[in-house]
Image (cartoon, rainbow, N blue to C red):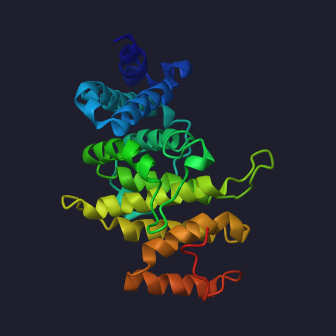
Amino acid sequence: MVWLLHNYFLPTINPSAAPESQTKLRSLEPVLKEYKKLLKITTRDTSLRTRNKPAILAALKDVERWIAEARVAANMGTREIGWETITLEVLSEMDPKERWALEQLCDALLEKGFLVSLSKKKRDFPAETFLPPKFSVQLWAPMLQHLQSLHSEFYFILAGRIISTLLPEGHSQSTEIPPDASYDMCLARWVKWSVEAHDENESAVGFDLRKEVTIAIMQSLGHVESSPLKDRKAAMTLLESLCTGVPELDSTLDALKFLSSDVQPSVRYFGHF
């Protein structure tokens, strides 16, 4: 109640009196680590699922509680955050505070050790599909599916944050942070997983996630056209995977390759890691 008093009721009555120190969110890392620990246990030994189900549900509820706290924090945070112009129709009617909260959640999931394993040896990609490592999917798919069931735009928000990571606007890679190609490729594969999960959900309505993600990637590529080709490899491989077999998108991809000065139309990125 004290947290709500200082972060919701008082700022609502008198926004100018909102204490800046109260806007800081609690870390989501402990919750994600607890969830990961529980799913590791039940994935490796299915006989323990029933025993650990209440703890897993509690972890998922804690994630939802964190999202609610983030939405409250966004009441004040929006005064400081430079909100980007929403150009994609899928986000045009979304509550900006919920979007911001989901973006913060996705950023936490993208930290190494969660959707992408810390160990490069564990990033063993399936050769037959452009999807994340099987064990990673077993760990995180239940949480992602749960979030999508409660927030219809979640998969798109997740894909958008990954695209922003793969193709940062104003590209300026820090020399202090060495490139991690397998990390980028794993993130790209999570986008493909999100698209396929959305396609398989018969209750999903409102927009074509594959098309929207393809548009988002192409828009982002337009902002980083001068960046080295190797820095765009994961994004281009993802784009190829999304478009292949879809006539409308495949022709658009061929046109993009033709117009790109350093990407030959005959180059096929899928499968070249």
- The one nearer the camera, 44 or 32, is 44
Please give left or right for residue 7 compared with residue 182 in the image: left
Do we see residue 57 in this rendering? Answer: no
Rendered position, 188 above or below 251: above
Image spot of residue 70 (x, y percent): 42, 31
Q: Measuring 45% from the left and 47% from the top, which residue is drawn there?
A: 136
Residue 219, image quadrant:
bottom right
Q: Measuring 44% from the left and 65% from the top, which residue is drawn there?
A: 213
Which quadrant of the figure contains the C terminus?
bottom right
Image spot of residue 223 (x, y percent): 63, 67
Residue 71, image quadrant:
top left
Which quadrant of the figure contains the N terminus?
top left
Rendered position, 125 above or below 264: above
Do we see residue 37 in this rendering? Answer: yes
Image spot of residue 120 (x, y percent): 62, 48
* Circle count: 0
Please give left or right for residue 242 compared with residue 224 in the image: left
